[in-house]
Amino acid sequence: MILGKVIKNSTYLFLSELIATLVNFLVTLRLINHLGTNDYGIWSSVQALPVMLLILSDMGLNSLMLRIIARDVTQKEEIVGKFILIKIFMSLMFVFTLALLVLLIGYERHICSYMVVVSLALCFSALYEMLMTVYRAQEDFKYDAKMNIIGKVMNTVFILIVIESGLRIGGLVVALVLVNIIMLMLILKKYVADNSIKLVAMSVKECVVIVRQALPFAIISFILPVFLQIDIIMLSRLKTYESVAIYNAPYRIILFLYIVPYVLRKAMFPSLSNFSTHDGSAFQNSFNYACKLVILTGVPMAVGIYLLADKIIPFLFSDTFSQSVVPLKIMAIMMAMNYVNSIFNVTMCSSGKEHAATVLFIFATIFNAFLDFLLIPRYDFIGACIASLAAEGLLIFGGYYIIRNTICELQLDGEYVKIVLATVVMGTVVVVTMKMLLLIQIVIGILVYLMSLFFMGVITHGQINNIRKLFLEKA
């Protein structure tokens, strides 16, 4: 059944992303304390610009490939043969563009060198993603999940070697290159065993047609990393690398917690797309259920992080990051808003309103950059946090307006009130137990919140039994 396949794929995705993100988060904490504020600020900046421009090596080709192969799997070898040549050309253009840009911006010479090598490493990653797209199109998410975990574990091992060897940014750059080369070799070995590679020569006109078809996907893919990295870029140019580190350390915590809306968005997109054309009632029910789910998870996490920020920062980072407490509090609010925005975005894209979603995202990114330019010189990393918070607020109001007027209604019922009340109860308990150890507080807070939801009827015995059956049922 389709539903069973969606649940199965979602489980693979969630578990792999959870494990991979947790491993990456833990090694990042170790790395931050190893490098310190200045070097970690440099390392963050070295990665930010290449990641932001990485879309130039893809231009939406992977998304277009996935759609074509998913519709007709017999075309996969021909499509790969056509697209791989375009991919290699675009990857080279990506490296050239980045090298030219870093020189024009005026980065120090050694940082320019690091960025160029990082861009080369990302080219290997881009080719890996292209071949993995073939398996995703065939819904082989089990292999995708396995490779995701292997990649993160390998990356962790290499970073730990760098740390234990006393190496710093140069060692991290070399490690990134090696990991991406090995991952490309692993998937290339499997692809060659499963398929044949047939390079297909194309005219310039044919290449232009393919790139034009992929362009809408490219625009959407380009905006997201820009939106996520713009504060770091602006801080690195308007302030110091210490400011970048103080901002980016708590941001790593928030990015780790973004796994919830990421997996939910990825899992719901196919079903929402189907419902948008075949079953409007199911579409609206799914939309409202998703909104309630992100409020149920995002709001209590935001409140908990806000209240415990003074204990979280010294628990995870060294004393040099003591100024990261206030940014973490602001980012906690931003995180809850992002949870809602993720559902608004997938709802618009699945219902044919992706152009409106793209325009809204572009406007929010420009608004974020404009506020960064105004606030960072005066308020430093706090200004960057406020700018991001305001941009997330703009996305919420804009997304709600578009959905309400062109797609469906958001139905606010009594359960939202119960979620807020349960969060208040949890927050009160957290404040009362402030003298306890942080981990004990977190456990108590989670238990109190879940018990409150259960007693208020938001979580029922029937829902618990359904979840149990889902995980006990064999595929």
Image (cartoon, rainbow, N blue to C red):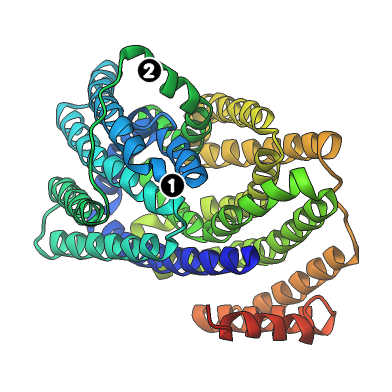
Residue 172 placement, left or right of 402: left
Few, some or many residues within 10 Å of mark 2 (<14, 14–19, 20+) = few
3D distance between C-alphas at marks 1 and 2: 21 Å
Question: How many numbered dots are placed on residues in this image?
Answer: 2
Left-right relation of 454 to 219: right
Q: Please give the name of the residue rendered at 51% of the width and 56% of the height, measured from the top-left corner.
A: 254
Residue 17 in picture, x, y percent from top left? 44, 63
Residue drawn at the location 30% of the way across and 26% of the way down: 86
Q: Label 1 amino acid?
A: Val
Label drawn at residue 106: none
Element on which disc 2 rests = helix
Image quadrant where residue 453 sits: bottom right
Q: Nearer the viewer, mark 1 or mark 2?
A: 1
Q: Earlier in the sequence, mark 1 or mark 2?
A: 1
Q: Which residue is mark 1?
A: 73
Q: Residue furthest right?
A: 414
Q: In the depicted view, which residue is nearer to us: 426 or 356?
A: 356
Q: Is residue 55 left or right of residue 39?
A: right
Q: Which mark is residue 206?
A: 2
Question: In the image, what residue type sits under mark 2?
Answer: Glu
Q: Position of residue 157 (x, y in %)?
A: 20, 65
Q: Quadrant of residue 319?
A: bottom left
